[in-house]
Amino acid sequence: MHARKWTFIYLSVLVMVSMLVALGMMGLPQKTATAQEGAELLFGSWDDENGNLRHLAAIEDFNAVYPDIKVEILPNPGGDWHSKVLTWIAAGELPDVYMADSSYIPLYVESGGLEPLQPFIEGENGFDPYEVFYPGVYENGFYQGEPYLLAKDYSTVAIYANKRLLDAAGIAIPEEGWTYDDLLDVAMQLTVDANGNNAASPDFDPDNIVQYGMDQRGGWFRGFQTVIYSFGSHTISDDGTTFDGYMNSEETIAALEWMRDAVHVYHVAPTTEFINSLPSGSMQAFYDGQLAMVFGYGPWFLGQMEEQPDFEYAILPMPTGPGGHHGAVCWAGFGLAPTSDDKDAAWLFLKALGTEIGQRHYSEHALSSMPEFMEGKLDHPFWSTFINEANYLDSLDDLKSPYFLQCIGDEAFTAVIFGESGADMDIAAYMNDEVVPQLQQCLDDNME
């Protein structure tokens, strides 16, 4: 046999042995005769055909260890995945393992759609999650102190910056520890009127801005939660029963006033109406130089940015606020159905997706909950900042009540405050007299 072919066979065997050793270290032993032999599982995926390719690859690797556990993907042909899950729960027909957005954990749990994972984590085929995962990422799969999901992937938020504009203004790339005051200062230097004056100049004309220093997240409330956390507040009580004292706390009001002033006092960010009028959204305006920074976005545009001709970017960490550096997250994971006929086999598969087997595939295109899969990206100019933001994550306030998202609604009050009508608004009065009473009434009505 040719020497090259022998080398290939040797390396293939070596890779397989290494993989099996790693699986064993992760608590995924090689298949032995167990009660799971012959198990047949359904896996509910919200992904399209392309997205399911990674699931199929993970299933193939899973079957290399557990060949007697058969897994079939139940695909999503379209439509509202959340509504589909609720229908399955009501009918008692959930897939054994299924994908879920962390924001819906409370509702799925209260509706009887998720099995608590702690008994499996502590059981014979368990493992220590705090030795494996970023704690802040792992705990975004919790409800009332109990884990219900293991992460598939997630997104932190950061600030996209046009590096050429920073360089032209003589601004050094901000680093971890910079503050919201620092961000405002940078944004003022990068906001330019038609005569070339920046927002720090006494000759600046706010009615003729050609380049804004930054944008703002308008009605996307989760995109603003990081600011509220870093100003020292949350938006709902830990027991999920009240918005009062949280959504209208002094710290929350200060966070809202900071961004409102960025729009209407310092003129470094456009109004909600202006952003909504952009034909291709903030990112195209960013590429065109109309926005120097994009505030509070996740790691979704690497390919798009690198396709822009002669465009140089920098990814900046979120600032440290009066309450420290804290962050919200977008998070997707895998849950186990209480109706599964073979929960032990379903757990083995769920654990595989959330740890070594699945994360090897999912980390190719997204952030992994496992630091070991992120080490190779820590020096990457795009990924490194988003990875480091995992060290500052708080649990989403969405996880505190089944009705949080329902009560916040699609058009958040932030769109109003940062819009044209917010210029002279008494934000404290608006929150105390209008927003919080409506939110609390919604919460109370649903809890009855």
Image: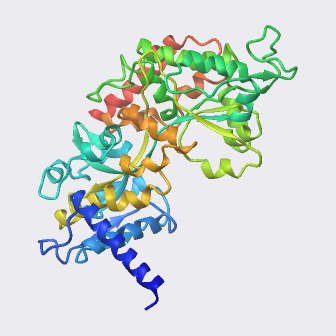
Determine the residue positioned at 88% across, 20% down: 195
Is 230 left or right of 338, judged from the image as shown?
right
Determine the residue positioned at 59% across, 25% down: 416
Q: Is residue 50 visible?
A: yes
Q: In which quarter of the image is the N terminus?
A: bottom left
Instruction: Identify the colour scheme used.
Output: rainbow
Is 169 left or right of 185, judged from the image as shown?
right
Image label count: 0
Eyeballing the image, is 295 above or below 28? Answer: above
Pick whichever, 220 or 242, lies toward us.
Answer: 220
Eyeballing the image, is 372 above or below 425? Answer: below
Determine the residue positioned at 39% across, 74% down: 11
Q: Is residue 76 visible?
A: no
Instruction: State the image coordinates of residue 181 (x, y, percent, origin top left).
Output: 57, 15
Instruction: State the image coordinates of residue 284 (x, y, percent, origin top left).
Output: 72, 43
User: Residue farthest to the front?
Assistant: 3
Q: Quadrant of the C terminus?
A: top left
Which quarter of the picture shows residue 71?
bottom left
